[in-house]
Image (tube, rainbow, N blue to C red):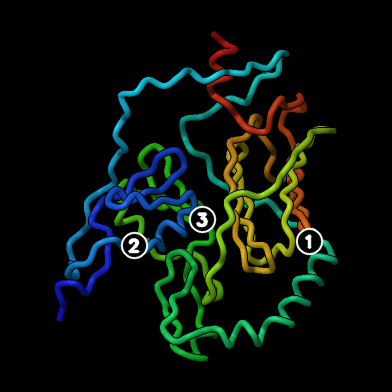
């Protein structure tokens, strides 16, 4: 039986604008896709088996925006050529320091009993693409089918970077089953959007440092197609997660690159295809247009 107010849902349509995921009905928004999906509904009504309305586009403001200042670098170094077709993402290999491994194992052994006692019957698995709920001790040993990558929205297409099953329909995207086998995650992970980082170049390599304590190697993922760099960093000994996306200024050799996971930071050592120095880490189309015009 479905009562008139038994369903708490979003009657509006989702839309994506300036890195934000937004519900049009209540304007709740987040830059993190998983956090946005977990936002509670704003309207009560009856349950329905009908598909919700599709993705909407934000209305364009008639207010004229002041032109942005474009900073053009001096010199002859140019960014790598962009391609219309999307290239396959490949994982960048990890090197884990002994200190990082010992730190994580020590924390796990100290927190195991406390973490297990906090799991309640009916709690949903927090991994994207998994719909299982915790039913007792047996649930801890079940295999979890989930999406280990990040959600990508590009030119109207929605897909997970781990399996790249693309669709333009948002409802179909949400229904895609997981592609990776692992363990269920029963505790909520804090999404951290801002994290300290810096970078420098030298010797034909780009060094990108992501500063975070207690990175969990088994849960982290770093992948690239040479121009796009995507990261899912689980840190704080598993309590925090940060997703980072970069469109790199130049092309890197993925197979010759690596990620060094330490106790307090991740150091990405990215092998340049072209040893010319980069004026910036990421590609900026506006600066390129200003330079060539």
Q: Is residue 90 visible?
A: no
- Which of the image's four quarters has the C terminus? top right
Q: Kindly identify which residue carries mark 2.
A: 175
**Mark 3 sits on what residue?**
162
* Pointer 3 or 1: first along the chain: 1
Q: Residues within 10 Å of mark 3 (few under 14, many from 20)?
A: many
Q: Earlier in the sequence, mark 1 or mark 2?
A: 1
**How far apart are the two marked residues, 3 and 2, measured between alpha carbons?**
15 Å
Instruction: Judge whether residue 271 can be spotted in this image.
Output: yes
**Vertical relation: 134 (above or below) 26:** below
Residue closer to the observer: 240 or 86 = 240
What is the count of numbered marks?
A: 3
Residue under pointer 1? 96
Could you say which quadrant of the image residue 98 lies in? bottom right
Circle 2: element type: helix
Tell me the distance, in whole angstroms, between the alpha carbons under discs 3 and 1.
Answer: 22 Å
The N terminus - image quarter:
bottom left
């Amino acid at each position: 039986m479905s009562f008139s107010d038994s369903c708490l849902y979003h009657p509006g349509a989702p839309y994506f604008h300036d890195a934000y995921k937004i519900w049009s009905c209540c304007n709740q928004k987040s830059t993190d896709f998983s956090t946005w999906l977990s936002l509670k509904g704003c309207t009560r009504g009856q349950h329905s088996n009908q598909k919700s309305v599709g993705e909407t586009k934000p209305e364009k403001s008639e207010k004229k925006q002041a032109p942005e200042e474009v900073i053009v670098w001096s010199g002859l170094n140019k960014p790598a050529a962009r391609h219309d077709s999307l290239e396959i993402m490949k994982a960048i290999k990890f090197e884990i320091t002994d200190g990082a491994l010992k730190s994580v194992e020590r924390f796990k052994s100290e927190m195991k009993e406390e973490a297990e006692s906090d799991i309640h019957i009916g709690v949903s698995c927090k991994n994207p693409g998994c719909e299982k709920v915790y039913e007792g001790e047996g649930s801890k040993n079940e295999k979890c089918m989930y999406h280990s990558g990040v959600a990508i929205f590009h030119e109207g297409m929605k897909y997970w970077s781990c399996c790249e099953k693309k669709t333009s329909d948002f409802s179909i995207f949400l229904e895609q089953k997981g592609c990776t086998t692992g363990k269920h995650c029963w505790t909520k992970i804090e999404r951290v959007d801002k994290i300290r980082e810096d970078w420098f170049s030298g010797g034909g390599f780009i060094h990108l440092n992501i500063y975070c304590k207690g990175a969990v190697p088994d849960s982290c993922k770093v992948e690239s197609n040479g121009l796009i760099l995507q990261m899912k960093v689980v840190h704080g000994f598993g309590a925090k997660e940060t997703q980072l996306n970069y469109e790199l200024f130049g092309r890197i050799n993925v197979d010759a690159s690596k990620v060094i996971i330490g106790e307090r930071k991740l150091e990405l050592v990215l092998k340049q295809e072209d040893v010319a120095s980069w004026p910036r880490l990421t590609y900026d189309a506006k600066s390129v247009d200003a330079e060539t015009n």
